Image: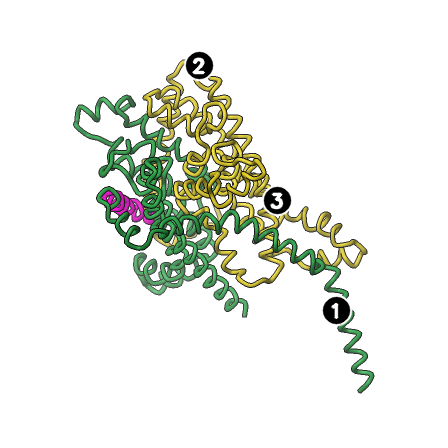
Chain colours: A green, B yellow
Amino acid sequence: MTTSTTVLETNDTLATRWRRATEEPAWLRLTLIGVALTFLALFLVLPLTVVLYGAFEQGLDVWYAAIRDPDAMAAIRLTLLIVAIVVPLNTLFGIAAAWAIAKFEFRGKPILISLIDMPFAISPVVVGLIFVILFGSQGWLGPWLSSHDLRIIFAVPGIVIVIAFGTLPFIARELIPLMQQQGKEEEEASLTLGASGWKTFWYVTLPNIKWGLIYGIILCNARAMGEFGAVAVVSGRIRGETNTMPLHIEVLYNEYMFTAAFAVSSLLTGLALVTIAIKSVVEWHDERRQRLAAN
Amino acid sequence: MSITLPRRRVIPGFGLTMGFTLLYLGLVFLIPVGAFLLYTTTMSWETFWNAVTQRQVVASYKLSFGGSLIAATINLVFGALVAWVLVRYRFPGKRLVDALVDLPFALPTAVAGIALVTLYASSGWVGQYLDLFGIRVAYTQLGVIVALTYIGLPFVVRTVQPVLEDLEAEWEEASASLGADRFTTVRRVILPALLPALLTGYALAFARALGEYGSVVFISGNLPFRTEITPLLIVAKAEQYDYHGAAAIGTVMLLAAFIMLLVINGLQWWTSRRHG
């Protein structure tokens, strides 16, 4: 009885001493956590708080009135119209690219993956400029477009195309690693059993990539609604016509209508919060699946 | 005569998906970028050189490259710390903090811009206290660095985090049992293992900061020669229909982005070779 207690105690002290050797002392741990959290509070929590505080400081009525303002509503409608065009296109692209890259072997695959990543590295301002130089009134196709009475720059088509460019990688980047990791055995089994290609995609692939696809779409949507630099170059900022939500926020801010600027911002902030919440859910699903697979 | 016959592809849709991928990539991205570069080559070398070496433009490079370098360095240090704290320690609200790290990636840059300038203006929540010490952030170069740090924040954390999670505890135990103190273990064992991921995150944060526009223009005040970033000059020149000037500077920024992408790809290859 006594002996076993001693043994246990010795093990305990040993365990404590061993833990000390690969862990930091408590004071250092607390300091590191404190410094990290202070940094994040300063850079993440405060900006978030200042937006929401600015939006609701003067009450819900003022917030609602700012949203219902005709110019704000026009900006919201335009932004929704644009994502309704861009997000489905980029979703199709993401699925097609991921299918080609993950299910087949071909030469130049790393180059294709790098090309898909590339729009992400290009400054949004340069993206806007590229299309102004192509389609602007002084640009390459400008004279031809104006003689046919077509407008791309300072009009909706220009905004659509720069946003499609800027958000092109997001869904593909989410799906490619996911589909590569899942391999192609399940699809091959389904096809060998006689299912058609579409049926296989619909009933085998899609359920497997569902969560990654949802996050990709939500992220693409948030980035598309929030795109600023590229749109600033091509939109011409025509009130009620070519102002998207971020441009409208800029106009309001520059006219010292801070409450209204923060009110419109609060909508996009809510969207950003939903986006990162969905990312957490997706990661939680992944972890659970990996744990199940490990067992 | 080949002995191994090419295995017939069971999975259909290669032509369709590859065709659509290349068509979309070509129409939206490759042809416009190619045409843009072609446009730049129609300029005479002199026009190009004069446009990219104007004094105001050179001052903007210094701020854009220098500011991005400083911001990425701040993110390297604090990003590594945040990743370490999130992987190694337990504290209440950890999951929430972990999720919040992605906020700069999801929040529109214009919203971040007006939030930061409101915080750091001399009447703002943070600015009023900094004012007491004579530190001005809004409408100074310091403000540019704050905005660039904000938008680069997720990158180092998110590249280091998975590598740190996969790091085998045995290495540290071996180091400790061989008599190394904790500081030596961190410096000689953990840090070298994290190095490729740290550099990748650093390069990503730098590349992102270099092209950033929305979050900077509100807080910087856009004073010529002092707080004008290069993307701002591109916008200004495009608005004045100075397409040659804008395209020349845009080409410089595009080349810088391509170089950064090559560096990042190289670093990622190094990381995967280390940990693959």
The numbered mark at residue B45 is: 2
Q: Give the range drawn in magenta.
A: A74-92
Q: What residue does disc 3 label?
A: B77
Q: How far apart are marks 2 and 3 (CA)?
A: 41 Å
Q: Is residue A229 visible?
A: yes
**Residue B20 placement, left or right of A287:** left
In front: mark 2 or mark 3?
3
Q: Against A235, is A10 above or below?
A: below
- The answer for which chain carries disc 2 is B
Q: Where in the figure is residue A268, as x and y percent of width and height?
A: 35, 49
Q: Where in the figure is residue B5, as x and y percent of width and height?
A: 45, 50
Badge 1 vs badge 3, beta-carbon distance below 8 Å: no
Local packing at callout 3 (Cα closer than 10 Å; few below 14, some 14-19, many 20+) is: some
Q: What residue does disc 1 label?
A: A15
Q: How far apart are marks 1 and 3 (CA)?
A: 32 Å
Q: Residue at x 53, y 61 (%)?
A: B93
Three-letter amino acid code at disc 1? Ala
Q: Against A83, is B46 above or below?
A: above
Q: Which residue is drawn at 29% across and 23% down?
A: A139
Q: In which quarter of the image is residue B33?
A: top left
Asked whether A107 or B17 is in front, the reply is: B17
User: Do circles 2 and 3 both sit on a common chain?
Assistant: yes
**For numbered disc 3, what is the local secondary structure?**
helix
User: Do circles 1 and 2 both sit on a common chain?
Assistant: no
User: Do circles 1 and 3 both sit on a common chain?
Assistant: no
Three-letter amino acid code at disc 3? Val
